[in-house]
């Protein structure tokens, strides 16, 4: 509840338009896997975008100075709001609902008096809809699309990291063995991904580590899975990813007896770092940091 109040205050604060604040807050909720809050923010984005659009149609250029406060074209916020809703439903396993919203941002051509900049955004979201359509189909069990999707992300560099997350999330969800792809693609790419420094890619990277840990456990490669968990935790403590951090701790505890002395030592050091720097020790058993 406290987080909701903080976000409402942020949405009402000055200097930054509420639509741009909503954009920032959705990204934060995505990072933290807080899907209830993400859904609420997506609804706020769409409601405000619709209100501004109706005013624009009614009053035309009279309201254009108000829209200048927005960082992006108004059509962007419709596309982003629909995309946000599709992601929320996708993460909740409601794939048919996700497809409904993917269809909405696949076709934004209803936007009246579109400028060249608006048209660029419309085409950009059409591209996003293709990538996310693949993702929902794979997650819902359509393994026959896997090769096509792999080709797609190889041809679109910006889709590589989120695409890999989708592939292994689908494998985990549907109990697929995709070792041929894992061994041919993952080990050589992870080093490069680990060097990425911008926040968006760091978030994608740790989410990929999470899925790879789960996949390795499913394939009975416990030692490799534990290393992925530890790599995840080492990064997550610097990014405030506590919701996923606690999930990965629970995953680690299930295989703790299989960890090597070196792995247990690394685990202990990570938890000590959390205890001393992040003040969340109440969530960690005392024997973990002794």
Image: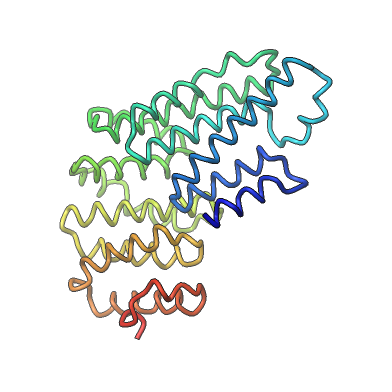
Q: Residue at the location (50% across, 66% down)?
A: 238
Q: Residue at the location (63% across, 25% down)?
A: 50
Q: Which residue ends up furthest to the left in the rendered image?
A: 220
- Relative to residue 203, is residue 264 depicted above or below? below
Residue 51, percent from left and from top? 67, 26
Instruction: Look at the image and tell me in which quarter the C terminus lies.
Output: bottom left
Q: Determine which quarter of the picture holds residue 110.
A: top right
30, 106: nearer the viewer: 30
163, 276: nearer the viewer: 276
275 to the left or right of 19: left
- Relative to residue 134, is residue 162 depicted above or below? below
- Relative to residue 156, is residue 195 depicted above or below? below
260, 249: nearer the viewer: 249
- For the rendered model, the colour scheme is rainbow
Residue 112, percent from left and from top? 66, 13
Tell me how many marks there are.
0
Q: Determine which quarter of the picture holds residue 113.
A: top right
Residue 164, percent from left and from top? 36, 43
228, 87: nearer the viewer: 87
Residue 194, percent from left and from top? 44, 58
- Relative to residue 85, is residue 241 depicted above or below? below
Q: Which residue ends up furthest to the bottom in the rendered image?
A: 290
Q: Residue at the location (72% across, 15% down)?
A: 57
Q: Residue at the location (36% across, 45% down)?
A: 165
């Amino acid at each position: 509840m406290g987080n909701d109040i903080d976000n409402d205050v942020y949405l009402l604060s000055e200097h930054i338009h509420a639509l741009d604040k909503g954009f920032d807050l959705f990204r934060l909720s995505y990072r933290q896997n807080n899907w209830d809050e993400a859904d609420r923010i997506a609804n706020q984005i769409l409601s405000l975008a619709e209100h501004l659009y109706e005013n624009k149609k009614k009053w035309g250029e009279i309201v254009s100075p108000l829209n200048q406060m927005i960082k992006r074209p108004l059509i962007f916020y419709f596309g982003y709001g629909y995309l946000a809703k599709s992601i929320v439903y996708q993460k909740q396993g409601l794939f048919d609902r996700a497809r409904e919203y993917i269809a909405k941002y696949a076709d934004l051509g209803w936007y009246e008096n579109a400028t060249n900049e608006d048209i660029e955004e419309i085409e950009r979201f059409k591209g996003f809809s293709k990538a996310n359509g693949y993702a929902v189909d794979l997650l819902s069990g359509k393994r026959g699309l896997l090769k096509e999707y792999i080709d797609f992300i190889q041809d679109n560099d910006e889709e590589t990291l989120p695409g890999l997350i989708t592939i292994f999330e689908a494998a985990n969800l549907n109990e697929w063995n995709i070792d041929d792809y894992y061994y041919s693609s993952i080990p050589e790419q992870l080093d490069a991904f680990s060097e990425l420094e911008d926040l968006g890619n760091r978030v994608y990277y740790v989410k990929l580590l999470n899925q790879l840990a789960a996949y390795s456990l499913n394939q009975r490669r416990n030692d490799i899975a534990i290393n992925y968990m530890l790599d995840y935790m080492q990064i997550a403590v610097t990014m405030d990813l506590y919701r996923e951090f606690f999930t990965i701790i629970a995953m680690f505890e299930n295989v703790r007896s299989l960890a090597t002395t070196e792995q247990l030592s690394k685990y202990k050091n990570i938890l000590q770092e959390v205890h001393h720097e992040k003040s969340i020790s109440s969530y960690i058993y005392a024997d973990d940091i002794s």
